[in-house]
Amino acid sequence: MNKIVVLGSTNVDTILSISHLPKPGETMHMQARSTAGGGKGANQALAAVRAGADTAFISKIGDDHAADFMMDTFKEDGLNLDHVTISETEGTGKAYILLQDGGQNSILVYGGANADVTPADVDAAKDTIANADCIIAQFEVPIPAIVEAFKIAKENDVLTFLNPAPAPSRRDIPDELLNLTDIIAPNETEAEIITGVHVEDDASMQKAADEMHKMGISTVLITVGSKGSFYSFKSGKTGFVNAFKVNAVDTTAAGDTFVGALMAKLDHDMTNIEEAMTYANKSSSLTVQTQGAQNSIPYAKDVK
């Protein structure tokens, strides 16, 4: 059983179902409105624990009803919550998801307590990180906290996994962080933002991966939605794992499911990369068939 630490965000999602994105000046009716747990960090932590990993979560929430709602979900799934702390100044993060017919979504995020995560919060979890197999982080918490977490990980031979979402420009990602990153996993849009390479086929995926290898990252994964996922090792080995074809209802949390499920199954030496990616793709294919984020993330028994 892999031991995973996830450093990341906790949000409460409000899902607004609409036929299409409104045009400037347009007023339109929603088809439905619902609330669910979310946040890229929380989604990835739940995906990992549901895939069978021993998972600890480092996050920050507000002192509010939204936090109570989220903590109940975390406890039900057996997450280690020793390092989920309460912000003294900010409320629990919020996300507003515009869900269009056909399953595509656009997301607006209010960081709230997520923006209050500090290197000191990470230092308090030093022993937990040092005893893990892998630490996962995204960009919904401040970069200094991620750098601190990855420093601790590298000092203890723990794999560092960066999901660069939401993607900042390349100039906003410190070289120090990239040098501490073992695995980076953008989608095609994020890969283009980071490298300047428009990802549309095998050649452009490899070109984007090569650019990230030049940044010091040994393993690059690029997810390309319904097509599947690409991997490239700095040593030269590459490959592509096809997605499973399903009728997508809502793509929210599909990428997060991929990340958490992948790292729950990936061996430290990464020799089982294609097997782990296949499991992660299968998990994501289940996620997109149900509306919502955390409620749609499957358990290992569902994937089997």
Image: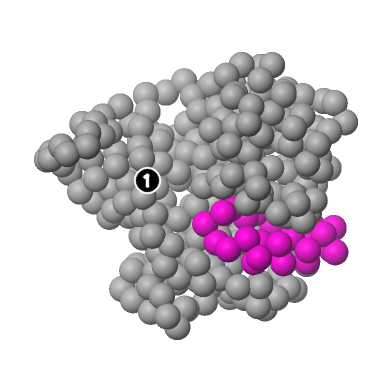
Q: How would you rate the neighbour count of disc 1 (Cα within 10 Å): few for under 14, some for 14-19, many for 20 or more? A: few
Residue placed under numbered mark 1 in the picture = 107
- How many numbered callouts? 1
Compared with residue 167, is residue 210 higher up or lower down, i.e. above or below?
Answer: above
Q: Magenta segment: does it hold 49?
A: no
Q: Is residue 37 visible?
A: no
Residue at the farthest right position: 235
In the rendered structure, which amino acid carries the disc numbered 1?
Ile
Which region shows up in magenta?
131-159
Residue toward you, 20 or 51: 20
Q: Magenta segment: does it hold 134?
A: yes
Q: Is residue 225 visible?
A: yes
Residue toward you, 61 or 82: 61
Compared with residue 237, is residue 116 higher up or lower down, i.e. above or below?
Answer: below
Question: In the rendering, at what x and y percent does residue 206 appear?
Answer: 72, 23
Residue toward you, 176 or 148: 176
Compared with residue 74, is residue 109 higher up or lower down, i.e. above or below?
Answer: above
x 40%, y 36%: residue: 251
x 15%, y 37%: residue: 26
Residue 221 in the figure: left or right of residue 227: right
Instruction: Name which quarter of the figure residue 30 lies in.
Output: top left
x 12%, y 40%: residue: 27
Question: In the rendering, at what x and y percent does residue 97 appear?
Answer: 32, 46
Q: Secondary structure at mark 1?
A: strand
Instruction: Name which quarter of the figure residue 76 lies in.
Output: bottom left
Q: Quadrant of the C terminus?
A: top right
